[in-house]
Each structure stands twice: as C-alpha cells, then as structure tokens.
Image (cartoon, rainbow, N blue to C red):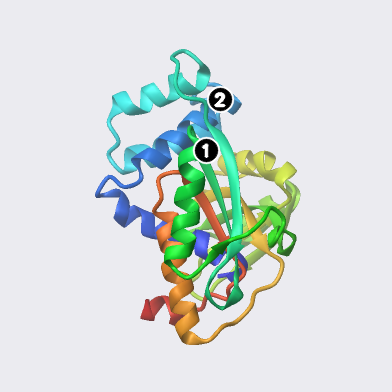
Amino acid sequence: MAGHSKWANIQHRKGRVDAARGKLWSKLSKAIIIAAKDGGGDLSANFRLRKAVDDAKAVSMPKDNIERAIKRGTGEIEGGRLETLIFEGYGPGGVAVMCETLTDNRNRTGPEMKTLFSKFGGEIGKTGCVSYLFDRKGVFVFAPGTDEETVTMVALENGGEDVEASEDGSLQVTCAPESFRDLEEAFDKAELKTESGEVLQVAQTTVDVDAESAKRVLRLLEAIDEHDDVQNVSTNLNITDEMMSED
C-alpha cells in the first residue's frame, strides 16, 4: 500500500479492534455530527452520513447516541461548537507529522497535543513548518478481492487521479479534494464498498529513518491517533510492512 498515506489505512483497520472496547465512539460521533451538518440528516441522500452511521453501528454504538449526533449536526439540538484545528511538527528522526483534530475546546486540545508530541520524542512546530511537504488528497481504500478493473474504470471516469494495488490485494484510489464527493457517490452507485474514504494530508515523498527512530515514530503516531479529538494523522515516514510486524 502506498507509504504516503499508509498510516491512515493501518489505523482504519486497527480501529475495528479498538472499537470493540468503545474507544472510537467519541470520534465516530463527531464524524456523524460533521456529516449531518454538511449534508443534512437524510441517510438516503447523504452518503457520508450513511457511512458514518454504518461505522458507528459496526462498533455497537447505541442508537440513541447516533440519533443525538445526527440531530446535533442538523441543529435540532444544541451542543458545543466543533472546530477543526491542525497541528504540525516533528517526530523522532526529524520526520514530519500532521494531525487534524475536531474539538469543542481548543484550550484543552492544544496543550494536550503539545504534551503528546513531547512525551513521545516529538515537537509541535509553527503553522507551516511541515505542511508544505504534504498535499491534501481524497483517499479511498478497498479491501483485497475488490475488482481492480471496475474500481479503476469508475475512478478515472469520476475524477480519480491514481489507483494503486498493494501486495495484499487491497486498492487505494486518490483524487483531488474537490472531486471527493463525486467519486464517493460514484463508488456507492457502482456498489463498490470502500473500507475507508477520507480527505487526508498525503506526503509528497516519504523518508527513511533508522529502525529505533522508526519505532519511536510509530509510538508517537499511535498515541496521537488515540486522542479523542484526533480525526486523522499523517506522516512522511516510509512505513514498511516489516516495521508494522515488529511494532
């Protein structure tokens, strides 16, 4: 799988295990809120909301929680205002790290992110310190066994830029952010089920570090990703299958 966005794909799959312990409910609630806010509360007309709800149901989130999140997104009930905050900095070995958070309290999230970076050998930087190393891209991942020819045809006809096949048979499709929703709907209409579909910061190129630094970077990424406010984490570290098997 493409190293440029491999961490996000790894975490999506790993999240299914963590979710059984209820660790993803907060993040999934926020995903539902944002989807409902952007596209309305009608599941039949809002693909992103439908997918967020399906993800929530898959980890046994109570129906009341799901409905409350939808109503909060549509404004039917009040709740704290959510805002997106981007943090960027450096991990062990000088690798670039970016994380996107969704929070109702920036005065809490900022210090907590700074502490996490520091605790695991990283450092929060100023705005723009590493963002120039990344491009914002829509990224879709399909499970092994998905028909590559069909995925490629739908992708290229609806704004997809690239289709990559990994050694395990999974597929990754990238597109420009402005094409994301059209491509998302096209995959849905073609009944091509995605494992994940997100707009992410994708590294333009990846870098290699020594084995010990790589392990420390993975621990940092793991810690950041487990924070309730964090929605996505990106790095320019070249994450190999060998690293993940040793981690």
Q: Which element is circle 2 on? A: helix
**Is residue 150 visible from the viewing direction of this image?**
no
Residue 120 percent location from the top left of the image:
43, 67
Q: Nearer the viewer, residue 29 or 184?
A: 29
Instruction: Give the quadrant of the C terminus.
Output: bottom left
Q: Looking at this rendering, what residue extends furthest in the top direction?
A: 76
Q: Which residue is mark 2?
A: 37
Task: For label 1, count other residues whose C-alpha is less than 10 Å away and answer few (under 14), some (14-19) or many (20+).
Answer: some
Q: Looking at this rendering, what residue extends furthest in the bottom direction?
A: 210
Residue 14 percent location from the top left of the image:
37, 60
Q: Is residue 14 left or right of residue 214?
A: left
Residue 4 percent location from the top left of the image:
62, 67
Q: Nearer the viewer, residue 202 or 54?
A: 202
Residue displayed at 48% across by 52% down:
113
Q: Is residue 199 left or right of residue 102?
A: right
Q: Which residue is mark 1?
A: 106
Residue displayed at 60% across by 48% down:
86
The tag on residue 80 is none
Q: Nearer the viewer, residue 131 or 10?
A: 131
Instruction: Give the quadrant of the N terminus.
Output: bottom right
Residue 42 percent location from the top left of the image:
51, 21
Residue type marked 2: Lys
Q: Is residue 115 left or right of residue 17?
A: right
Residue type marked 1: Arg
Q: Nearer the viewer, mark 1 or mark 2?
A: 1
